Structures are given as structure tokens and as C-alpha cells.
């Protein structure tokens, strides 16, 4: 088979060489492009002749998929696959795999970091201490004994719950199905409305799909306590971000820590959250740690080898 890695995986080239060697040893052809492109024409050219393409978070649109011949697997070195045109892939009977699990720890730790920043005013304190007219210090809050609502209790949501539990938080959760690992932490499942009403800290961990887009609506956001904060390190469109900004500016919500938006950064100057009160914004880096990049590279190449061996794994669309 011909395997093509179409973009860098943020690990050294030497690691790519090592991970691809077992494929070469089996007689397969491996090509690697170490510069990213978003141009469809270039992606089509890079994909030519491939049985398997490997990508990360680079968009892989319909026009590229439709131009491929003989492609069998789109191997995504990322958790979400909403940047791949799934309809076009399904029409051509091309399977899609992902690298589920590589960023569980990384994302969960950023959630904690954003919550701590909102609760203790770390970013604001840094700006204040640099001023000649130093204002009164920010009086914050502790996570201990707060109620943390986890929206989406999959692997990342459950990891986040574990970290909040270590701080002494009480856990409630919302998910389509109940997970025993989450319940073992003492997490109590409730409906979404109850979670929004009772939580002091809300952390979003749903995948983005037709069912979850906009699920944290203006109506749901309006149910939050005025003292509550919301953290989103999942996908931007899960939340009505214009409504979130409106409620933050009206001080009906105490704060928000946001790593994901309705589009990838850079954001337009008029994007509502850029001017919202009491926000800490990050440029979609929840997944981005040295350790996570190494783990996802290993998972991606394991996915490729498993597919070649007739034992496909991490398939998210047949």
C-alpha cells in the first residue's frame, strides 16, 4: 500500500522515520510532507495514488476526497474529525479513523488552568502588578466544595472530573449515556437544565455533531448562577458564543475560559468574546503539549499498521 502523511505532526522528523519504518519493512511505500498546506489543489496532488492518507487538524474537504482514486482510509491524528468532509468520504466508501485519547490529559489540565485563572485572577494579576498604580489585589475563590458540572463524560470529560475531584469538588454530569468510570468518582448524572442551574463551574466536553451544535444555547446559559463560570475546551459551536458574550457583559455569568471558537484563530476583530467581560481566551491549544504530540504520532501510525493488517482500530466512520 501507499501511505502518505500530508502534514507535520509536531514531532521530530527522526520520530516519523522511526514510526514509519515498520511500514517500509513490510514493503509499503511511505511519503511524508513536512510543510502544512490548506490549498485544495496541493492536497489533491499530495493525495494522488494513496491508499491511506494521514492528516492532523488540517481541513480535508469534499473536493479533495472526490478527486482521490483508490483511497481507503483517512487517518486523522486528532480527536475530532469535523474538519473532514464525512459525507464525501462515505459516498466513496472511505473509512475515517481518529487518534482518540492522545490529548485527554492535556485538555483536562488546560481546563483546570482556565478555571484557576478565572477563580484567582492570575492573568489579571500579572497585568496589574506591572502597573505603576497597582490596584487592590483580586480576591478569588477556591475550587474545593464547589459543584462542577461536566457536559460530556467521555474520556476527556472523565479525566477532567478526576482532576476537579482532586481539588475537592463535587461532581455532576450530563451525557447521552452514563459511564461507570465517571460514576465511580462520585459523579451524579443529571439533565442538562439541572446541571446549568446547580453548577459553580461548567466544563464542556462534547463532540461536535448535528445533535450537539448549539446545545448550550442562550436559554441554557441563562440558567447559570450569576457566580458561575464556564470553560469550553471542546468545540466552539457547541455553545451560543454570542449569547455567552452578552450574558458576560451583563454580569449574569461570572466568567468564561474559552479555548475553542466558532472558527479557528485568528478571530475577526468583532468576534463577541474578544470584548466580553471576565474572559480568559486561549488559541485552541488544549491538545498541544509535547507529550500529547508524541502520543498522537504513535496512535496514528498504530492505526495505519492495524488497518493494513486487516484489524482496523479507532474507526469513527465506516
Image (spheres, rainbow, N blue to C red):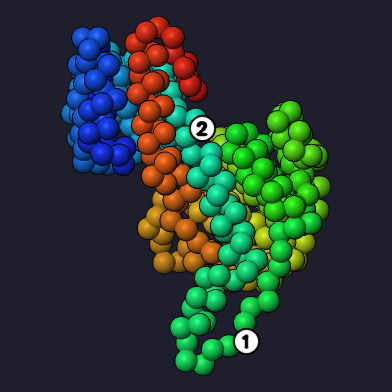
Question: Compared with residue 293, is residue 134 higher up or lower down, i.e. above or below?
Answer: below
In the displayed orientation, state which residue is furthest to the bottom: 133
In the image, 290 versus 156, the foreground residue is 290
- Which residue sits at x=78%, y=49%? 170
Q: Is residue 32 left or right of residue 96?
A: left
Quadrant of res 120: bottom right
Q: Is residue 236 left or right of residue 294?
A: right
- Which residue sits at x=55%, y=76%? 125
Q: Does dot 1 land on a helix, a strand or a loop?
A: loop
In the image, 61 versus 23, the foreground residue is 23
Numbered circle sitting on residue 5: none
* Mark 2 residue crowding within 10 angstroms, few (<14) / some (14–19) / many (20+): some
Q: Say which residue label 1 marks.
A: 136
In the image, 84 versus 107, the foreground residue is 107
Q: Position of residue 79 (x, y in %)?
A: 47, 34
Q: Is residue 188 visible?
A: yes
Q: Is residue 278 left or right of residue 188?
A: left
Numbered circle sitting on residue 101: 2
Instruction: Tell whether label 1 touches label 2 (CB within 8 Å).
Output: no
> In the picture, which quadrant includes the N terminus?
top left
- Which residue sits at x=53%, y=39%? 104
Tell me how far mark 2 sits from mark 1, CA to CA. 43 Å
In the displayed orientation, state which residue is furthest to the top: 310
Q: Position of residue 173 (x, y in %)?
A: 74, 41
Question: Compared with residue 14, is residue 244 higher up or lower down, i.e. above or below?
Answer: below
Q: Position of residue 85 (x, y in %)?
A: 41, 30
Q: Position of residue 217 (x, y in %)?
A: 67, 50
Q: Tell me which numbered mark, 2 or 1, is placed earlier along the sequence.
A: 2
Q: Is residue 245 visible?
A: no
Q: Does dot 2 land on a helix, a strand or a loop?
A: loop
* Mark 1 residue crowding within 10 angstroms, few (<14) / some (14–19) / many (20+): few
- Which residue sits at x=53%, y=42%? 105
Amino acid at each position: 500500500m501507499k501511505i502518505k502523511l500530508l502534514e507535520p505532526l509536531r514531532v521530530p522528523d527522526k520520530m516519523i522515520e522511526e514510526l514509519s519504518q515498520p511500514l517500509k519493512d513490510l514493503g509499503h511505500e511511505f511519503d511524508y510532507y513536512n510543510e502544512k498546506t490548506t490549498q485544495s489543489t496541493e492536497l489533491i496532488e499530495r493525495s494522488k495514488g494513496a491508499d491511506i492518507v494521514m492528516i492532523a487538524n488540517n481541513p480535508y474537504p469534499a473536493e479533495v476526497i472526490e478527486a482521490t482514486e483508490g483511497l481507503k482510509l483517512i487517518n486523522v491524528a486528532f480527536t475530532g474529525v469535523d474538519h473532514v468532509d464525512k459525507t464525501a468520504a462515505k459516498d466513496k466508501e472511505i473509512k475515517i479513523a481518529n487518534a482518540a485519547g492522545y490529548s485527554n490529559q492535556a485538555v483536562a489540565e488546560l481546563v483546570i488552568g482556565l478555571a484557576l485563572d478565572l477563580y484567582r485572577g492570575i492573568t489579571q494579576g500579572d497585568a496589574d502588578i506591572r502597573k505603576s498604580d497597582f490596584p487592590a489585589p483580586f480576591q478569588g475563590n477556591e475550587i474545593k466544595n464547589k459543584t462542577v458540572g461536566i457536559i460530556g463524560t467521555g474520556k476527556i470529560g472523565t479525566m477532567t472530573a478526576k482532576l476537579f475531584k482532586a481539588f475537592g469538588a463535587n461532581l455532576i454530569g450530563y451525557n447521552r449515556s452514563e459511564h461507570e468510570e465517571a460514576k465511580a468518582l462520585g459523579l451524579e448524572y443529571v439533565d442538562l437544565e439541572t446541571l446549568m442551574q446547580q453548577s459553580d463551574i461548567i466544563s464542556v466536553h462534547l463532540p461536535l455533531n448535528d445533535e450537539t451544535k448549539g446545545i448550550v444555547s442562550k436559554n441554557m446559559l441563562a440558567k447559570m448562577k450569576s457566580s458561575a463560570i464556564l470553560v469550553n475546551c471542546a468545540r466552539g459551536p457547541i455553545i451560543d458564543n454570542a449569547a455567552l458574550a452578552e450574558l458576560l457583559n451583563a454580569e449574569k455569568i461570572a466568567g468564561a475560559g474559552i479555548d475553542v471558537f466558532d472558527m479557528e484563530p485568528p478571530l475577526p476583530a468583532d468576534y463577541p468574546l474578544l470584548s466580553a467581560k471576565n474572559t480568559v481566551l486561549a488559541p485552541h491549544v488544549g491538545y498541544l503539549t509535547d507529550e500529547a504530540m508524541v502520543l498522537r504520532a504513535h496512535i496514528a501510525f498504530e492505526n495505519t499498521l492495524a488497518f493494513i493488517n486487516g484489524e482496523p482500530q479507532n474507526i469513527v466512520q465506516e
